[in-house]
Image: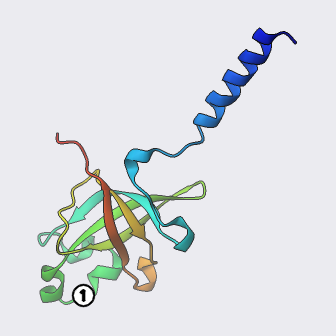
Amino acid sequence: MNWQGSFAVTVIALLGFAGCASDPTFGVVDWQHGARRGVVSTTYGADTAPAQRPACVAALPPDQYAKQRFVLVRYQHVRLTRTAVAAVPANFSLKEGDVVELWPADCSAGGLSRISKVLRTAPPL
């Protein structure tokens, strides 16, 4: 193989490896301990009817529900897209499209997921 062929193979290999790199603009997620990168897809407000709330927050008393804000977050687990309900920390202002570090829990079993940090905010509409 001549040097041009070697060069072409090297360039193609480097481009292929570059596609495997993670996007540094998203921030670092603690994958080893169970955190996931998720996107806020729905916000549950005080005006959301109890019948439309997820199981893990529908059972909350109205005064406790009014004190907190909740969001539905979509995240990848292996090849599947999953959803989790999380309470929004008091010092966070989240909106749909924001990318967060999520610690998922099973809402159907009564667990609430936890959001530990905002990785990237959604662009304004």
Q: Which image quarter: residue 38?
A: bottom left
Residue occupying image coordinates x 56% and y 69%: 32
Q: Quadrant of the N terminus?
A: top right
- SS type, badge 1: loop
**Left or right: 109 in relation to 4:** left
For label 1, the crowd category at 10 Å Cα-Cα, with few meaning under 14, some 14 to 19 and many 20 or more, is few
- At label 1, the amino acid type is Leu
**Left or right: 61 in relation to 16:** left
Q: Which residue is mark 1?
A: 60
The residue nearer to you, when weighing 65 against 97, is: 97
**Left or right: 29 in relation to 15:** left
Residue occupying image coordinates x 72% and y 16%: 8
Which x, y percent locates residue 27? 39, 54
Q: Quick one: which residue is furthest to the front in this view?
A: 3
**Left or right: 7 in relation to 107:** right
Which x, y percent locates residue 41? 31, 56
